[in-house]
Amino acid sequence: MFKDIMLNTLVILTPVLLFQVFFPSTQYVKGTKQRVFWGIICSAMIIICMNFPLFSNDIMWDLRYVPLIFSFFYGGFLSGILTYIPFIIYRATFDLDIPFIIASVTMTTIFLVLMYIRNKIDSLNTYHKIYLATALNVTFNTIGFLLSNYYLIVTTDESGVIFDKLLFVYLISTVISSIIIVLIIPMIENYNVNQILKEESYKAEKLSVVSEMAASIAHEIRNPLTVVRGFIQLSLEKSNDQDKLYMNTAIEELDRAELIISEYLSYARPSMPVKEEIDVSNEVASVVELIKSFANINSVELTYSAEKNLRTLADKLHLRQILINLVKNSIEACSNKNSKVIVTLTYSQGFICVEVIDNGKGMTEEQLSGLGNPYFTTKETGTGLGLTVTFDLIKNMNGTLKYESEFGQGTKAIIKIPGYKYYKRSKNG
Ligand code: ADP
Ligand code: MG
């Protein structure tokens, strides 16, 4: 039997290995071509499993459910159906008898269950995937066991003996297939994480070159701006009132350009955390200003209301990054007309509270619980790293980030960080 266990394990491992050979630079299983490939090899593995059953003496029992589970877990519906249909056809070529009906009913039930839950699988983390796959495997084996048992009781006289044998076969197979699942899922998930890291590092590399260039260009533009401003200032004194008005407007606009450039440079600067006293009210205002054009492009109305003079001890760039990540997510969650994102800043009892509220698409319970997990994203081009970093940064500030959300209604992100309200002293105080 040991030989059979080893053989079956190897058979089930084959799709995992073949996938890495044929698609060395993608994750499991992204893209239509990959899904088709995955579905077909998983179905081939079911057929091999059936040809080399774990038990083959009185009772035949194989590990057919495992490849079907993997097919759905990583390839979705397309893979699932490409695994399911060949199984039914192949099984039909044996005999169109009652065991065929039992096998088909079991497999179809499993197919339907997996089809129903397939969309929820992606957002689970590794542990939850393992629990779910194991639970499904145990359930499926049990269904198979109960149906076969019923059939055997009906068709044989020695039902007692057969029942004992079947129970033994069922228990051993369930344990072994569960162990295989527990070993293979982390392997696939780890591989996925490595692939994502690889992609991320390429992206980061490109981005850093671009932002370095942009930073140096921004720097170059600043110098002529200063010169122009200087000359306008000089001629200002000699001009009449009408010209003065024009020149002052020109200077104001130059100052604005200068401000935008220095803001940009401060974002592009690589960050070593420096804790300093910062005015959170000003930071919120400047981030909202900065991200306004992004909101406009997405036809989202971005507004904010902030209490003045709220201060905290933190790294300025980190605070900005947190705010940008949250506001950007909110804007990205909005797709309909009348989309609004509101940022509010309040103070109460030693804590500064920033709320980012949107009326976008909201989140389901599952998505909510996935927030902050690395690589958890529902966006086509998302990284799923924004909130991971954000949670981390807020923790470093001894703060908290909580989410309230209703699917289809909108989301509220609530940051609380320690801080205080600064009161200007009056002259005699
Ligand atoms: P990314 O933005 O790259 O997807 P994040 O870590 O910033 O990564 O966000 C993770 C996921 O959390 C998003 O893909 C989205 O599904 C969900 N999410 C975050 N903020 C919101 C929000 N305001 N409304 C709806 N979903 C959100
Ligand atoms: Mg994001």
Image (tube, rainbow, N blue to C red):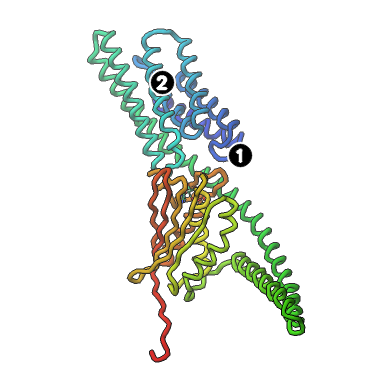
The residue pinned by badge 1 equals 24
Which secondary structure lies at badge 1?
loop
Residue at 40 percent of width and 80 percent of height: 423
Q: Quadrant of residue 123?
A: top left
- N-term-proximal mark, 2 vs 1: 1
**Which part of the image, by quadrant, shows the N terminus?**
top left
Asked whether the viewer can see residue 311, the reply is no
Residue 142 x %, y %:
31, 25
Crowdedness near tag 1: few (<14), some (14–19) or many (≥20) residues, C-alpha within 10 Å: few
Query: Residue 374, relative to residue 179: is it above or below?
Result: below
Q: Is residue 137 above or below residue 100?
A: below
Closer mark to the observer between disc 2 and disc 1: 2
Are discs 2 and 1 less than 8 Å apart at CB?
A: no
Residue 282: x and y, percent?
50, 70
Q: Which residue is mark 2?
A: 108
Q: Nearer the viewer, residue 416 or 85?
A: 416
Q: Nearer the viewer, residue 240 or 354?
A: 240
The x, y position of residue 129, in whole percent, is 41, 39
Residue appearing at x 75%, y 77% in the figure: 227
Which residue is painted at 41% across and 20% down in the image?
108
Residue at image location 24% in from the left, 10% down from the top: 158
**In the rendered structure, which amino acid carries the disc numbered 2?**
Thr
Q: Nearer the viewer, residue 55 or 344?
A: 344
Judged from the image, the secondary structure of the residue bearing numbered disc 2 is helix
Kind of residue at disc 1: Pro
Please tell me in which quadrant of the rendered image residue 27 appears.
top right
* Mark 2 C-beta closer than 8 Å to ligand 1: no
Farthest-out residue, left: 160
x and y percentages locating residue 384 in the rendered image: 51, 49
